[in-house]
Amino acid sequence: MKAFRFGLEKILDLRTFRCKQAERQLAEKVGICAQIENAILDRRQLMRLYRLEMKGLAFQERWAVERYISRLGHEVQKLTEEYNKAVIEREHAAEVFRKALAEKKSLENLKQKLAERYRKSSLRWEVMQADDQFQSFRGER
């Protein structure tokens, strides 16, 4: 009997490629979210540090530090808005990845089922061939 050949192999390859592509895009979006989150945490940490250190400063220095803290606060707001947009993009990329993975898995499952069916059919055929040979061998005696 011939070896098993899956007729939709090219489509499975394409779905595998799309799945890997979607996974890369998701990883990129996750990385962007992590960078923005780290930037927000850094700004907030700086704000805390400067608030603690400005207690012993003169009026002019204290005013400059307050302005800097205010600027950091604006940066945190802006970064938070960017983060919210990035999270939406990340969730969209995750959904695209889940769909691509499901499509790939469905074809892989079909391939496995057909391969198993082919293997069983092939085994039956081999058993029938062996029986025929045995019967012909018994008949010659």
Image (spheres, rainbow, N blue to C red):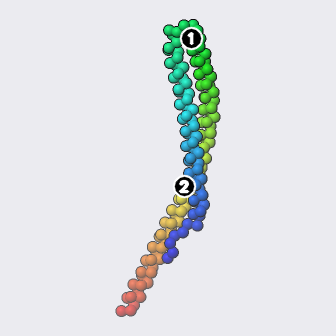
The residue at 50%/72% (across/down) is 3
What is the distance, in whole Å, between disc 2 and disc 1 at their CAs? 63 Å
Q: What mark, if any, has residue 105 been given in the picture?
A: 2
Q: Which residue is mark 1?
A: 61
**Observer-nearest residue: 30 or 94?**
30
> SS class of the residue under badge 1?
helix
Among the 4 quarters of the image, the one containing residue 7: bottom right
Quarter the C terminus occupies: bottom left
Q: What is the quadrant of residue 58 in the picture?
A: top right
Q: Amino acid at mark 1?
A: Glu
Mark 2 vs 1, N-terminal side: 1
Whole-percent x, y for residue 77 in the image = 62, 25
Q: Is residue 83 above or below residue 95?
A: above
- The image position of residue 11, as x and y in percent, is 60, 60
Report the residue at 53% width, 65% height from top. 114
Foreground of the two, 30 or 57: 57
Mark 2: which amino acid? Lys
